[in-house]
Image (cartoon, helix red, strand yellow):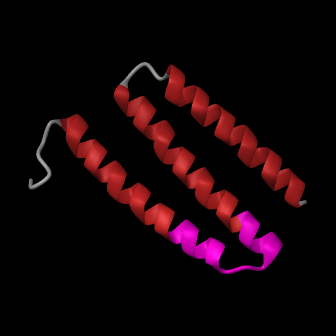
Amino acid sequence: MITFFYISLLLCCTLCMWRIGRGPTAPDRAMGIDILGIIVVGFCAVIALVTGKDFYMNIALAWSLLSFIGMIALAKHLEGKGFDE
């Protein structure tokens, strides 16, 4: 069962990397990077389930917060607004 999760997450990771490299516009690439961050959080959750260690969930939480803040900043930059608006 866990192997299925690993394989499906690796497949999703491959597809996101393809979208990041192939994406015709900057928002497409940003979407790929955001989804790749979500996949990393998924990997951390699966590893936490397998090993029983809770610090992987702390890593997942920190990664998701940094990813959210980074995507907000990137969206503002792509929109052409400053960070103080």
Q: In which quarter of the image is residue 56?
A: bottom right
Counting from the top left corner in percent of width and height, residue 39 is at: 61, 51
Counting from the top left corner in percent of width and height, residue 6 is at: 80, 52
- The answer to whether 39 appears left or right of 63 in the picture is right
Majority SS type along the magenta span: helix
Q: Residue at left 60%, top 27%? A: 18
- The answer to whether 4 appears left or right of 81 in the picture is right
- The answer to whether 74 appears left or right of 83 in the picture is right
Counting from the top left corner in percent of width and height, residue 67 is at: 43, 56
**Magenta span of residues:** 46-61
Question: Looking at the picture, does residue 73 appear above or below residue 13?
Answer: below
Question: Looking at the picture, does residue 57 appear above or below residue 28?
Answer: below
Q: Residue at left 86%, top 60%? A: 2
Locate the N terminus and report the quarter of the image it occupies: bottom right
Q: Residue at left 56%, top 54%? A: 38
Q: In which quarter of the image is residue 24?
A: top left
